[in-house]
Image: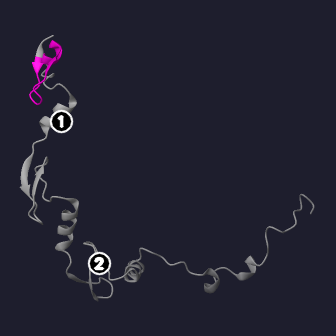
């Protein structure tokens, strides 16, 4: 078995010729393989300007807190409620209504929620039908 040197940790290890012919056996362990794939680049945080070292090329912020603050910083404008047209300050970036009541009223108006109507009040179900107690009706088969 040939002895190969790991390009990450410079450790010598033996590899079968089968793996070498197929282009494998370059790294001594999975940890060294993972380190070789990680490319650290230095960026500056777009919100606070701190220097950050990231393994990803698309990292924009130094922390999750900076990312959330940057997301909500652009959307803290005054908005108008979709239902009642009042102005309000949005707490989240996707708010469209000034209150839960306006949101519920809009859902009812759009037909997404149907209110349960009282069948006795409308007269669809006669009240006489529900006066009898069906669980206490004598059973003819049992005789009591």
Q: How crowded is mark 1: few (under 14 residues within 10 Å), some or many (20 or more)?
A: few
Give the CA separation, mark 2 to mark 1: 44 Å
Between 99 and 115, the one lying in front of the other is: 99
* Residue matched to label 2: 96
Picture quarter containing residue 88? bottom left
Up the image or down, 62 lies above or below 81; here it is above
Which of label 2 and label 1 is nearer to you?
1
Going from N to C along the chain, the mark reached first, 2 or 1, is 1
Residue 83 % position (x, y): 33, 84
For the point 79% across and 75% down, which residue is it?
Answer: 132
Q: Which mark is residue 42?
A: none
Residues shaded magenta: 4-21
For the point 62% across and 80% down, which residue is it?
Answer: 119
Residue 46 % position (x, y): 10, 63
* Residue matched to label 1: 34
Q: Residue furthest right?
A: 143
Secondary element type, mark 1:
helix
Quarter of the image that includes the C terminus: bottom right
Up the image or down, 17 lies above or below 97; here it is above
Residue 80 % position (x, y): 25, 85
Quarter of the image that includes the N terminus: top left
Residue 1 covered by magenta stretch: no
């Amino acid at each position: 078995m040939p002895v190969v040197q790991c390009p990450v940790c410079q450790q010598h290890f033996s590899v079968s010729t089968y793996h070498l012919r197929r282009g494998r056996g370059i790294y001594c362990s999975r940890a060294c393989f993972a380190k070789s794939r990680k490319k650290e680049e230095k960026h500056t945080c777009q919100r606070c300007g701190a220097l950050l070292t990231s393994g990803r090329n698309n990292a924009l912020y130094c922390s999750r807190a900076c990312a959330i603050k940057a997301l909500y910083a652009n959307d803290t404008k005054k908005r108008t409620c979709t239902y009642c047209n009042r102005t309000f300050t949005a707490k989240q970036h996707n708010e469209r209504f000034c209150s839960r009541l306006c949101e519920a009223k809009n859902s009812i108006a759009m037909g997404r929620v149907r209110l349960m109507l009282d069948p006795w009040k409308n007269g669809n179900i006669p009240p006489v039908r529900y006066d009898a107690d069906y669980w206490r009706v004598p059973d003819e088969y049992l005789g009591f």
